[in-house]
Amino acid sequence: TPLRLVTIMSIVGRMRTRGWWLIAAAICLASQAATAADAPATITRVEQVKRLPARLSSQVPVRFEGVVTYVDLTYRSAFVQDTTGGLRLEVRMDHQLRPGARAEFTALVTGGGPSPSATVEEVVRISDGADQWPEPVRAAEQELATGALQYRLVQVEGRVESATVDHGGRLVLAVRVGGVLVKALVRSGFGGDYRKYVNAMARIAGVLAAGEDARGEIRSVRLYAASEGQVQLVGPSPT
């Protein structure tokens, strides 16, 4: 009868709908399982952060331990380094990080690739002293021009072409290293005579931060020094 036919078609329709729903659910579970399998293990090193895409669709939680190499409260930024590389951090005013101290903290990665960055969530532990500095890597013109030592503590040597103090109290030195002009920013609340640096040869230890243009070529090189103690005059400019 027509009524029985309608009933049978309705049952078949529900079975088809339920079948498609089961298929969709299976696909969803398989996708989640694949995503979990592809997800990296707990991130604890800079080298793992650098393997992530430069632009992330969502922030990635990490637990990290390393030596703080630079802190700037004015810009709420800091750098930290472990044995595998350096990481740029965005910090809160109450972050408790100190240059030269070893710190363990949780953070959210905001970008991977050659210039890794993260936002600090919680400082879990920090050493009492500030004498945990890693040995700076000597950076010549080639290393500065390639960005291979991005966010690591390096040492450069060159002639100071100009010196000034910015609005944040940082000593700003323009240092010529071969064909590369390095802008050294010395976080010291500087109040001395900065003119003594002009035309002198200086050796500076600081965190290297190279800026790229849209084509990925290095266009600017900055060096973030935690204090004036990381700047050493080694002689007058050669004539």
Image (spheres, rainbow, N blue to C red):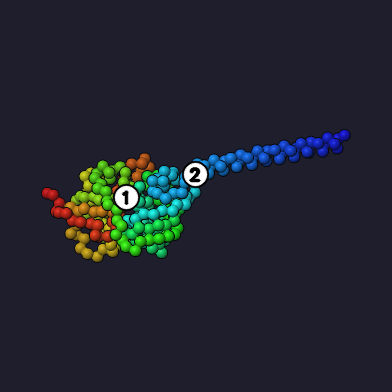
Q: Could you tell me residue 105's position as x and y percent?
A: 42, 57
Tell me the CA gap for discs 2 and 1. 27 Å
Q: Nearer the viewer, residue 171 or 121?
A: 121
User: Which residue is tagged 2?
Assistant: 39
Disc on the earlier residue, 2 or 1:
2
Residue 78 pos. (x, y %): 36, 56
Q: Residues within 10 Å of mark 2 (few under 14, many from 20)?
A: few
Q: Is residue 183 left or right of residue 36?
A: left
Give neighbour class at mark 1: few <14, some 14-19, many 20+ (Cα, 10 Å): many
**Mark 1 and mark 2 in contact (Cβ < 8 Å)?**
no
Residue at figure coordinates x 45%, y 58% from the top left: 121
| Label placed on residue 152 | 1
Q: Quadrant of the N terminus?
A: top right
160 vs 68, left or right, is: left
Residue 213's place in the image compared with 62, above or below, is above
Q: Which mark is residue 216?
A: none
User: In the rendered image, is residue 12 in sight?
Assistant: yes
Which of the 4 image quadrants contains residue 99? bottom left
